[in-house]
Structures are given as C-alpha cells and as structure tokens.
Amino acid sequence: MATHLHDDHLGMADRVRREYGAELVLSHREWDAVQAQTFDRDQSALLDEWGVPPERRPHLPSGQSTVHETRQPDVLVGDGDVLDLGRPVRVLLTPGHSQGGITLVDVEGQHILTGDHVMPHINPGLGLGYVGGGDPVADYFESTERLLDWDGFEVLPGHGFRFARLGQRAKHHISHHLRRSRQVARVHEHDPDASIWATAAQLSWTAGWGGLEGYYLFSALAQTAMHLDFVRDEARSARWLASAY
C-alpha cells in the first residue's frame, strides 16, 4: 500500500513485494504520474521561463525526478473504492501534494491514514510529482476540505505521530497555503508581468529570500509558479481567496 509516489513511500515497494509477498496498491492517477516521470531532466528551459538570473542558476539543483522506477502495481484504485484489509477501508482521492495521492478511511476503527496530505507538525509541499499540467493548489484546497467530514477520526500520517483533531490541522494547512496564494495575488495585481523570480523575491520566506539555496530555492520558485497559476484561474481561486480560512 502506497498513499503516493514519492520515494520515501514507494521506493522500497518492489523489495517488500519480493521478500514478503505483499501487494502494491496505488491509485490509477498516481500510477499514470509514475509512468510519465522524466528522469534526469534538463531544467534550463524552465529556469528561462521563471526568469532566473544566470548568476543564480549554479545555486539550483540540476533537477531529478521525485520517484524512481517501479513495477506495475498489483491493485489500482480510484476514489470511493473499498479495500478489504481485514475490515473495509475506503479510498479517498486527495490530490495536491501529489497528482494521485490517496487517503484511507477505516470507518469501523475510526482511523484515517493521510499519507503526506495532512501531517501533525509540518506543512506539506504541493505539486511534487505532478505531470502534464494541473492545478495542485486548487486540488489541495478542495481535497483537504473533503477531509473535514472525518474530523472525529484518529489520524495516522505518513510522517510524525498519530493525532486527533483532523479538522483543526486540515484548516491550518489550507490557511498556510492560502497565505502564499494571497501574497502572490497582491504581487500579481500590482505587477501582472512580473516573472516567477521577481514575484518570489517579494514573498515572505522562513529563511528569508536571500537565505534560500539549492533545493529550497528551487522549491520556492516552483511553489510561486503554482500559486500564480492558481491565482490566474479565477474560476477556481476566487472562492478560496475570499474565504475565511
């Protein structure tokens, strides 16, 4: 069972299957993303698109895929499917952190396995492993709001520790990412032609804009690009930007 495609969740799947006879369960959408991954990508065109100055490019990683190759899953699932794991477990498709991530709901035991979608002490990154477009920010807001229906369940996350009050934590995640969207919206309103680099430089970052290097700088630019795409899609963003989160 893998909630999503990232190496810290899927990377040992083939070995576990080989040594223990386990079955790999993955969502259809996540398997599509795994198959579409491009390894050792040249990201120079992307850096051009983002407007990254030549002198800062050596500070960025060369760009690797978020997942290594794996064999065909034994079971592919979709939203609403029910797995028999000794008792029924419902599958919820919860994209945003990844393209086809799933959350698993044990209704009988009142447990919910959230993978990296909702965690007790860190905010999940968005769009990690998306391929072929999409809107990870809107996907994340919409799928996270779905989880409020399971607020009374004990949460078993992919990192950290089990916890209660799913609704409180889910709302915190939405609010956290909406702060970034709203910052981007203000920059875009003032300067609609600003590059991703110029936009990111005007946002608030924990380490400060000047303190970002390597993967963290690349992530900041990628997150800025995602939030800008979200802001530009008024059909999906208007409700969230005006919400009370």
Image (cartoon, rainbow, N blue to C red):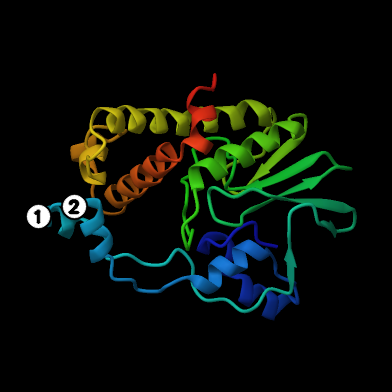
Report the number of numbered marks.
2
Q: Position of residue 156 (x, y in %)?
A: 69, 43
Q: Which residue is mark 2?
A: 52
Q: Quadrant of residue 232?
A: top left
Residue 192 to residue 125: above or below: above
Residue type at numbered disc 2: Val
Residue 173 to residue 102: above or below: above
Q: Which residue is mark 1?
A: 55
Residue 166 appears left or right of 220: right
Residue 104 appears left or right of 224: right
Q: Give the class, few, some or many, for how many residues have Cα within 10 Å of label 1's Cα (few <14, many ≥20).
A: few
Q: Position of residue 225 (x, y in %)?
A: 35, 46
The residue positioned 45% from the left and 40% from the top of the image is 233
Which is nearer the eye, 228 or 154? 228
Residue 66 appears left or right of 110: left
Element carrying mark 2: loop
